[in-house]
């Protein structure tokens, strides 16, 4: 693939350790096993789509990756660092390198688009304001809404808000970008504009883990599809295999339901 | 329908007559507005004396409010901790301080505290400020806690995901949003506090109420002088209310709802 040109910059360090490594990760909500012994690894430049029926643990999986949820057992390593052993400030550093895009966008409503974008770079990465602003404008350009910089989130459409949220994550210049059902809260006509931005992002070589029901996107962009059910990874395959000939019964059933319409 | 309207107008007329008779029965000739009239020399002197209390009322209230807001926030924070032990600190403070009447607190601070230690020599002003600030901080702690708790979980997660720590999150994400929501109850508390400052008159603070009391003792004209006092508080609190409203509007238009 010709994307490899842009990934090359990060390639040397990546070959040794995977960016994300999960081993036997378990997450409990009371008696309920949201994650039940999950192991996976994500390499630099990899684009993983996580799918599965609702309640299968896919959101919990990526929320554990930046510790919005703390796992109860097993080990998660980001860039070689075991998350459960990190102090508060070390965890913050890791989080700054793992971007997250939420289903509900979660933009800061009291800040303008530009301020939403510069907050992280200025407060976490300690960039001076001018540099942060320049960075923000650059990424607004990347998500195709440079003209909205001075508006407040409420003045934007859902699709625009989600693109701002993506730009906000990008401004932290993360090593990995996590997407938690990024298009599920959007009106149908706005899904495409968000997916387009995500496809472009994938083409730059960004490492991505995406929880989504958008199978077209998965087919186009992913190099790995992880199918989950009941807190377990049922199968992990390349898209061609997964869509044409899933190796699990539950995977077949899921695809049948989701691709029917 | 007809009967209804006849009864309605009959009642209104009766009320009118009753009010007129009541007003006529008042001792109008007993009134002596000259004691507070700007047209007479005595009136002017008295008015200036009364208005002079404004300086102390304002100084004391503003100092107490500033301290109580900071204190209230500091006390609200442990109340939001996931640890029950830390939360207990907040509960104990709030329940304890909230239960003490402000007047009792004023007495306790002014007359009680200096006995505790020879080094403590508290003047009237600071006794008033401490009592008001303490009492108010418990209420403000509750207002802050409620405001901060009302911020959606997603906001906190978004702040976490861009690597903000506890204080960064509080300073840039949570508090600015919470402040907008708590402005109405906070304004309420401000007005309440301003009124409660009148209680400090009992230990001799030369604020509005104390001065009115002193003037009443020397002129024997309570009705006229307390009426002026009522007016003073009315105007003061009206201005504060307008200020809070203005602030609310400003913050809201900022967010461009």
Image (cartoon, helix red, strand yellow):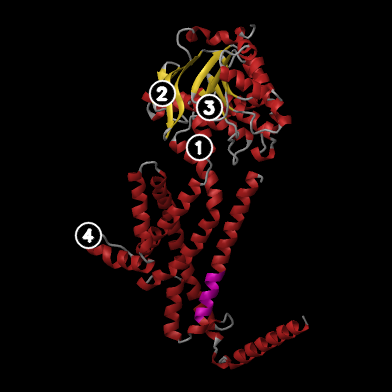
Label 2 sits on a secondary structure element that is: helix
Comparing B201 with B147, the one in front is B147
The chain letter for the residue carrying disc 4 is B
Question: Are the residues flagged by discs 4 and 1 from a single subunit?
Answer: yes
Segment tinted magenta in the rendering: B225-234
Comparing A209 with B115, the one in front is A209
Question: Are the residues flagged by discs 2 and 4 from a single subunit?
Answer: no
User: Is the residue B4 above or below the residue A124 in the image?
Assistant: below
Label 3 sits on a secondary structure element that is: loop
* Residue B36, percent from left and from top: 54, 81
Cα–Cα gap, marks 4 and 3: 65 Å
The C terminus of chain A: image quadrant: top right
User: Is the residue A205 above or below the residue B154 in the image?
Assistant: above
The residue pinned by badge 3 equals: A56
Comparing A146 with B160, the one in front is B160
The residue pinned by badge 1 equals: B156
Residue B37 quadrant: bottom right
Cα–Cα gap, marks 4 and 1: 45 Å
The residue pinned by badge 2 equals: A83
The residue pinned by badge 4 equals: B117
The chain letter for the residue carrying disc 2 is A
Quick check: marks 2 and 1 in contact, CB under 8 Å? no
């Amino acid at each position: 693939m010709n994307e490899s040109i842009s990934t090359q910059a990060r390639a040397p360090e990546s070959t040794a350790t995977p960016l994300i490594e999960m081993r036997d990760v378990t997450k409990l909500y009371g008696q309920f096993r949201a994650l039940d012994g999950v192991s996976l690894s994500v390499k630099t430049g990899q684009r993983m789509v996580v799918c599965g029926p609702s309640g299968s643990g896919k959101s919990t999986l990526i929320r554990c990756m930046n510790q919005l949820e703390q796992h109860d057992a097993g080990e998660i390593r980001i860039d070689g660092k075991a998350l459960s052993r990190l102090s508060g400030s070390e965890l913050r550093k890791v989080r700054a390198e793992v971007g997250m895009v939420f289903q509900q966008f979660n933009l800061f409503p009291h800040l303008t688009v530009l301020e939403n974008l510069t907050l992280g770079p200025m407060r976490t990465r300690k960039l001076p304001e001018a540099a942060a602003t320049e960075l923000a404008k650059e990424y607004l350009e990347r998500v195709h809404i440079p003209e909205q910089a001075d508006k407040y989130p409420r003045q934007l459409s859902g699709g625009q808000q989600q693109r701002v949220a993506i730009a906000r994550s990008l401004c932290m210049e993360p090593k990995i970008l996590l997407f938690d059902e990024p298009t599920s809260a959007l009106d149908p006509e706005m899904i495409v504009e968000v997916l387009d931005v995500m496809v472009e992002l994938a083409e730059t070589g960004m490492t991505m883990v995406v929880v989504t029901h958008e199978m077209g996107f998965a087919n186009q962009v992913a190099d790995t599809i992880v199918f989950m059910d009941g807190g377990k990874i049922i199968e992990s395959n390349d898209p061609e295999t997964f869509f044409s000939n899933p190796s699990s019964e539950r995977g077949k059933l899921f695809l049948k339901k989701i691709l029917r319409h | 329908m007809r009967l209804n309207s006849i009864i309605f107008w009959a009642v209104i007329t009766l009320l009118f007559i009753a009010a007129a008779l009541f007003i006529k029965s008042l001792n109008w000739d007993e009134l002596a507005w000259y004691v507070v009239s700007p047209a007479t020399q005595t009136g002017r002197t008295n008015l200036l004396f009364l208005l002079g209390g404004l300086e102390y009322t304002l100084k004391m209230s503003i100092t107490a409010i500033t301290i109580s807001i900071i204190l209230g926030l500091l006390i609200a924070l442990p109340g939001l901790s996931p640890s029950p032990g830390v939360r207990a600190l907040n509960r104990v403070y709030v329940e304890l301080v909230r239960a003490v009447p402000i007047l009792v607190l004023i007495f306790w601070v002014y007359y009680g505290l200096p006995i505790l230690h020879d080094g403590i020599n508290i003047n009237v002003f600071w006794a008033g400020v401490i009592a008001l600030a303490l009492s108010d901080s418990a209420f403000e702690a509750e207002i802050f806690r409620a405001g901060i708790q009302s911020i959606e979980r997603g906001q906190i997660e978004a702040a976490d995901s861009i690597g903000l720590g506890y204080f960064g999150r509080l300073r840039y994400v949570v508090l600015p949003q919470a402040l907008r929501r708590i402005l109405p109850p906070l304004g309420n508390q401000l007005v309440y506090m301003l009124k409660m400052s009148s209680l400090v008159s009992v230990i001799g603070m030369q604020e509005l109420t104390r001065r009115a009391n002193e003037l009443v003792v020397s002129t024997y004209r309570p009705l006229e002088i307390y009426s002026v006092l009522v007016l003073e508080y009315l105007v003061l609190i009206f201005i504060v209310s307008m200020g809070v409203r203005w602030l609310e509007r400003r913050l809201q238009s900022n967010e461009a709802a």
